Image: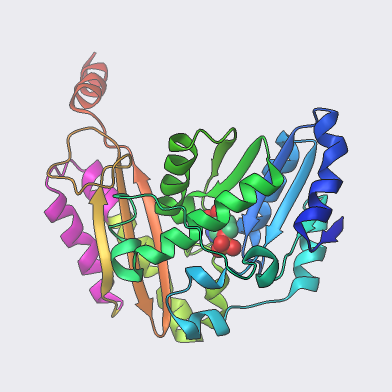
Amino acid sequence: MRTIRTIEELRCALANPRRDREKIGLVPTMGAFHEGHLSLMRRARVDCKLVVVSLFVNPAQFNDQHDLSSYPRDEQRDAALAEQAGAHYLFAPSVDEMYPRGFATTVSVSRLTETLEGAHRGREHFDAVTTVVAKLLHIVAPHVAYFGQKDAQQALVIQRMVRDLDMPVRIELCPTVREPDGLALSSRNVHLSDPDRARAASLHRALGAIQEAITAGEHDPVAARARAIEQLTTDGLEPEYLELVSPDTLAPLEQIDGHPILALIAARVGTTRLIDNELIQPLSTAHAAGSTNQGRA
Ligand code: AMP
């Protein structure tokens, strides 16, 4: 695997494979690799002839300066892990390479970015994400780009950008990788103290409580949400947000009616802000009736 720092060098490296019509996969990351990142890279390696992993801690998408300065960085370790996972190029540009003097362009997706993470971190967070991902997609011009379901809103926003701007790339979503107790892997988990680490799995338990309530036949999103709040309260946590929304529009659900539901949560555990989500497929009335009938037959 080769580490590349400049856009020009990366474009040169990709020119021959592109001419030979080799399938190129891109995995955009901010580094501090864990199994979540590595699962995206391995998936890209299975699908594509050539895998580019980008490592860029995008300062513009941090609304909290402390979060930026304390973001874990270890490029040497990351390079070794990316190589083991099958990456061919690690694109690790400087901030100046990505934002040259006079940089003045923003790619902005409206509506989907105004709620949840956008409401709490500010629209500028997603503007910075879409701008940098649009740049990476132009630089690498991959056939497929890989993102994690862990950042469900981010993935939806990127899918919308790609569709709206007719970018010739397929966006592939990969499942959230979790610790054995359910905590979603995140680069920020290293900041959790031992007691906070122990209760951090509460986010996943809260989403599980929503899933259980829905599976048990709950039709009222407010009641399902209350079950999750109970779980969080038991663990001494208070969510920044906890919402049941449509997975396509992120609009809050009025009722649970057999359509898929996206349950999303953000909460501070100690000083560390964590997010998680679960896509829930309720049993439709027809399906539930069908199983009962089969049971009786
Ligand atoms: P980040 O470095 O946090 O910006 O993440 C880079 C990519 O890895 C994004 O597409 C994330 O959604 C994805 N990712 C982060 N954590 C996980 C996880 N636990 N499971 C699967 N994908 C993840």
- Image position of 187 with respect to 282: above or below: below
Is 225 one of the magenta-colored residues?
yes
Residue at the spot x=60%, y=52% of the render?
135
Q: Quadrant of the C terminus?
A: top left
**Left or right: 172 in relation to 254:** right
- Using the rendered view, name the quadrant where residue 45 is placed: top right
Residue 78 in the image, given as x and y percentages of width and height:
75, 67
Q: Main secondary structure of the magenta part?
A: helix
Image coloring type: rainbow
Q: Looking at the image, can residue 146 be seen?
A: yes
Residue at the spot x=32%, y=37% of the render?
281
Residue 191 in the image, given as x and y percentages of width and height:
53, 82
**Left or right: 190 in relation to 141:** left
Please state the extent of the stretch shown in magenta in the rendering: 210-235
Is 228 one of the magenta-colored residues?
yes
The extreme front residue here reads 102
Q: Quadrant of the N terminus?
A: bottom right
- Using the rendered view, name the quadrant where residue 222 is placed: bottom left
- Quadrant location, ligand no. 1: bottom right
Residue 65 in the image, given as x and y percentages of width and height:
48, 83
Residue at the spot x=29%, y=57% of the render?
114
Of 23 and 4, nearer the camera is 4
Tell me how many marks there are: 0
Q: Looking at the image, can residue 84 be seen?
A: no
- Image position of 269 with respect to 94: above or below: below
**Left or right: 75 in relation to 278:** right
- Using the rendered view, name the quadrant where residue 203 is placed: bottom left
Residue 67 in the image, given as x and y percentages of width and height:
49, 80
The extreme top residue here reads 297
